[in-house]
Image (cartoon, rainbow, N blue to C red):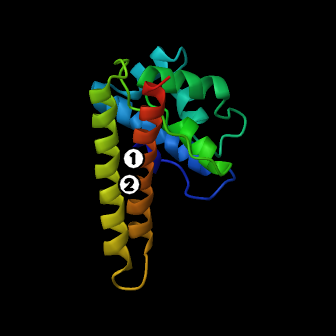
């Protein structure tokens, strides 16, 4: 796998690099293409792309321009989300089509939020049963909370 080829030494921005590697790997798997194809789509070479995805290659760092290009090509903004997380923020892009805000569409979105809230509460209940919240349980709770925020952002966007 692409993200397994580099040293595991922790560098200051290694989580951003790991996320970029995952986005590129997922794009390759989804498209059934190799790294050469991704590099060509980004207007670079395989070697340069590999180097820019390796946090140890400080002479060819992952640039903002490259992050934007990878995000546009893949339709995946996880790198930007990871950058925000590094600074203590959580970004969530609303999942909303440009449907008009009708009473029914607002009700449906609100019911989806209520369902997500219930799933979050269920995850928390299961996690605290033994009196300890382990890392996997924390991840599941964070994921459910994130999905709830996305739905809320979608409702807000719908009502603009």
Asked which quadrant contains residue 47, the reply is top right
Give the vertical position of 29 relative to 43 (above or below).
Answer: below
In this orientation, which residue lies closer to the viewer: 149 or 103? 103
Residue at position x 30%, y 66% from top?
A: 122
Residue 15 left/right relative to 119: right
Residue at position x 54%, y 28% from top?
A: 49
To which residue does mark 2 refer?
144
Residue at position x 55%, y 40% from top?
A: 91
Q: Residue 71: x, y in percent?
A: 50, 26
Which secondary structure, mark 1? Answer: helix
Residue 112 left/right relative to 6: left
In this orientation, which residue lies closer to the viewer: 74 or 40? 74
In this orientation, which residue lies closer to the viewer: 36 or 106? 106
Give the vertical position of 47 relative to 6 (above or below).
Answer: above
Residue at position x 48%, y 40% from top?
A: 21
Residue 112 left/right relative to 146: left
Q: Residue 158: x, y in percent?
A: 42, 26
Measure the C-alpha gap from mark 2 to mark 1. Answer: 5 Å
Crowding at label 2, few (<14), some or many (≥20) Cα neighbours within 10 Å? Answer: many
Q: What numbered label is drawn on residue 147?
A: 1
Crowding at label 1, few (<14), some or many (≥20) Cα neighbours within 10 Å? Answer: many
Q: Residue 141: x, y in percent?
A: 41, 62
Residue 21 left/right relative to 87: left
Q: Quadrant of the image for the N terminus?
A: top left
Q: Is residue 13 visible?
A: no
The single residue placed furthest to the bottom in the displayed view is 131
The single residue placed furthest to the right in the displayed view is 59
């Amino acid at each position: 796998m692409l993200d397994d080829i580099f040293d595991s030494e922790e560098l200051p921005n290694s989580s951003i690099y790991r996320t970029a590697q995952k986005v590129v790997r997922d794009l390759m798997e989804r498209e059934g293409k190799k790294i050469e194809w991704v590099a060509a789509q980004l207007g670079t070479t395989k070697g340069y792309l590999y180097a820019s995805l390796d946090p140890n290659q400080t002479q060819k760092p992952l640039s903002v321009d490259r992050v934007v290009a990878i995000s546009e090509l893949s339709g995946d903004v996880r790198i930007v989300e990871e950058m925000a997380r590094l600074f203590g923020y959580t970004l969530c892009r609303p999942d909303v089509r440009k449907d008009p805000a009708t009473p029914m569409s607002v009700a449906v979105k609100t019911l989806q939020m209520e369902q997500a809230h219930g799933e979050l509460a269920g995850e928390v209940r299961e996690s605290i049963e033994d009196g300890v919240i382990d890392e996997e349980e924390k991840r599941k709770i964070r994921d459910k909370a994130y999905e709830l925020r996305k739905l809320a952002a979608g409702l807000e966007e719908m009502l603009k």
